[in-house]
Image (cartoon, rainbow, N blue to C red):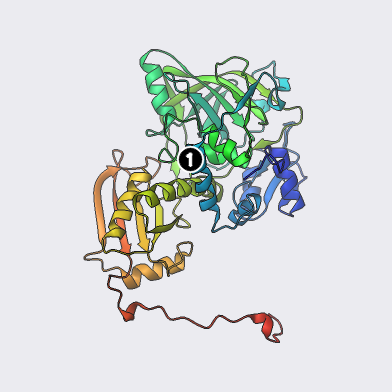
Amino acid sequence: MNLAERKLIDLQSCVEFMQRHNHLIRVKSEVDPDLELAGIARKFEGGKAVLFENVKGRDYPVLVGLYWNRDFLAKFFQTTSARLPFALADDIRAWRRNPVEPIIAKQGPANEVIENDLDLSTLPIPRHAEGDGGPYLTSSVVIAKDPDTGVRNLSIHRMMVTGKNRFTMLLEELGHVMDYFKRAEARGQALELTVNNGVDYALSMAAASPASAAPIEMDEIGIACQMHGAPVRLIEAQTVDVEAIADAQFVIEGKILPNVREPEGPYAEVTGYYAGVEARWVFEVSAITRRRAPIFHSILSGKEVYNAYGLIAGAGAFDKVHSLVPEVTAVHFSDGSVPYHLVVQIDKKHEGSQRNAIMAAFVSLAFVKTVTVVDTDVDPYSVTDVEWAVQTRCRFDRDILHIPDAIGHRLNPMVENDKWERLGIDATVPLPREDKYKRATMRNVNLDDFDIEGA
């Protein structure tokens, strides 16, 4: 994608790009980071990004909304909204074929200033929802290293501030960082991390890559290198043996403590519900560095999470599912599914391929709850079109596939004992295709050929 050539590899350049394309709202009034900031941001969700220039009691502005408009994301990557997942899938494939290594230096913008006082309260970390247990990091990219191989991993975790130098954080059971931590803890060791706030689109997308797209033995920073069209710049950390992102706004160094759990939550998750309070993992801060004039980045649970995760997860899923079932032509997380519902479009040549596609999708994405397969005359990006296909092409007595007692996503309130039932829906026309399933069409006309007033 050659983002480096276009000089779009840090948050400042992203903000300038949004400003040039009339996609930025600036809030100049003083705004309280406790609830008020997020309350204002929610009013603009899905539209332009919002830069809060005057955050009460803090020295740094806050950006929200970097990912919440899919059409603008596509413009950033010089493609269309429909084509964006395929462009990301192309980059993932290219990375796997020919991975590019990052460049490591001692200094960069992210450590221009080394804070002497480790006090997280000086950072403009917002508390978003009224029931949240505290201020949360929601968008920072975490770098960890496999304790056995040293391979780097990128990920994003919610992290609740619990003290001047302390967070409690969520680790996903099937995530690579959890795998790293379990092996480190078994040896009585901490797992060192750098937490990088305010990075560009490519690094965030790489951090959201599912395990099916980014195997544990490969350095996920290479995905961002591929998107940049150049090696990502890293810097040596001050206190841990894990690198940081040189162009980040803030870097928080530290370690997840072994055999220590403390309360985390509640937190308003992407599901639209509060994740409850549980004893979770503790991150102890050992250093904070930053740019001289940083912009703090935060995301709201909602459209931003859906776009950041849904796009890259969809790209990885397409790559995997298409390799197993070549008739698959597109995949898309259904709008509003947060994202648990994957729509798979297939150019069905053989009866039964649609069921193979359902199973391939479940294998590719561990947390998908529902897979709906549709034909190529159905728009997988349209909730209305997919619903039409389900209601007119699915016989519930034969076209519904139930998979009971599958591993579920623990953030979903329907999950009990980490299990739920997965559902496959075949909304494709049976072969051989009968005329009764032919869609009604209208002539495609060019409105420019007509004299129309008031349109």
Q: Residue at x 56, y 34 (%)?
A: 136
414 above or below 241? below
Q: Nearer the viewer, residue 312 or 195?
A: 312
Q: Residue at x 69, y 15 (%)?
A: 116
Give the x, y percent position of residue 236. Answer: 62, 19
Query: Callout 1, which amino acid?
Result: Ser
Mark 1 crowd level (few <14, some 14–19, many ≥20, 10 Å Cα): many
Q: Quadrant of the N terminus?
A: top right
Give the x, y percent position of residue 239. Answer: 59, 14
226 above or below 193? below
Give the x, y percent position of residue 216. Answer: 42, 31
Determine whether, in the image, residue 423 is placed left or right of residue 216.
left
At mark 1, the secondary structure is: loop
Does the rendering let one see residue 337? yes
> Can you identify the residue that label 1 sits on?
209
| View extreme (front): residue | 98
Q: Quadrant of the C terminus?
A: bottom right
436 above or below 215? below
Give the x, y percent position of residue 13. Answer: 72, 41
